[in-house]
Amino acid sequence: MVMNSEVLNLEAVDKSSHKRIMGCSAYIRRVFVNPTHDMVIKRPHSFVNPSGIVAIPYLQNWIYPSSNLVELGRNLSHFFGRDPPLYAKRPSNPKPNPSPHPPPSTSFSNPNLAIGSSGMIRPAIPPRAFLQSPYGSGGGGTVIMEDPSEVYKRNAIDKLVGSLHRDIIGLREARETDMEGLFNAQGVLKQREEQLKQGLKEMQDEKEGLEQQLQMVLMNSDVLEGWLRDNEGKLTNLGNVVVDMVFEPCDNLSKQMLDCTASDLALDDVIYSLDKAIQGGAIPFDQYLRNVRLLSREQFFQRATASKVRAAQMQAQVANMASRTSPYAL
């Protein structure tokens, strides 16, 4: 039994036309049985055809590099142990001559006759022609005679195998191109997914901000509605109303905030008047700088005081709202 390995990614030779088929990237393992002179191939056999080519499931499912020669040998041993592909030839029995000695007139000029060890004349066995493997044989000096039908069949199989591998290569390249396109599309989809997640997070943050503003508006509306209910009856008791006396601070913080705001606005008016005076040349420049410096200092303290009062008012308002149960609370 002989095993031969063809690496078809280098080249495969078509034995009928000796043309080279390039571009195959798979490995093909061919195993064939080469009988000796005294043995013949069993016909029919499940895994060996008359030309000696072996076809077992392990060879048909050969995948490089997971398949190897060790497992191939084990499979061959298993299948051939169950059903041997070769058997010995039956020896030809020569017809015995009734006379123990040849007659004197017997001639040995016939090349097809030979003398045995007992002196009996037996016909010589002519050389038997057998099918030779396409990959060489173990013996030398034998006459090679191949069946034309087997040669044609082998060449057709080789052509079909080459065509099949070319088709497989084309299909694989097409599938690789499709996979590359799918991977690119997957990358784009992932990028868009990240953008959508970022946009959703921004909308959720904006929603939370709007809910906080809505809560503040509802709280202010509640306060305003309460003030209107408390002061609605006072309109009927008022006669000639003095506008400056209508609004009065309700607590010390409000009075302090009103004073600070009025002082800030008054200082703005004074600084604006000084700007007009310096532009018209009514006051000297050094006196203008001195007065602006003093007024700006005073305005800074008024604004700082107003900022602290505003923070205290906000804290008091939040504490007051927390102590009351509002029907608009979310």
Image (cartoon, rainbow, N blue to C red):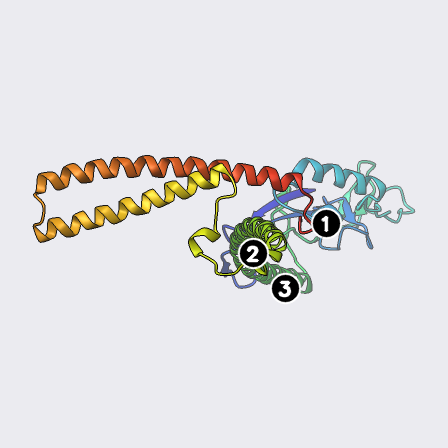
Q: CA distance from mark 2 to mark 1?
A: 37 Å
Q: Residue at x 76, y 40 (%)?
A: 75
Disc on the earlier residue, 1 or 3 = 1
Q: Residue at x 13, y 42 (%)?
A: 288
Q: CA distance from mark 3 to mark 2?
A: 34 Å
Q: Is residue 271 above or below residue 239?
A: above
Kind of residue at disc 3: Ala
Q: Helix, strand, or loop for circle 2?
A: helix
Q: Is residue 171 above or below residue 287?
A: below
Q: Position of residue 239 (x, y in %)?
A: 52, 61
Q: Where's the N terminus, which quadrant?
A: top right
For the residues bearing labels 3 and 2, Cβ distance under 8 angstroms: no
Residue to which mark 1 is pinned = 54
The disc placed on residue 118 is none
Looking at this view, name the residue that lies furthest to the right: 98
Residue to which mark 2 is pinned = 179
Residue to which mark 3 is pinned = 156
Q: Quadrant of residue 44?
A: bottom right
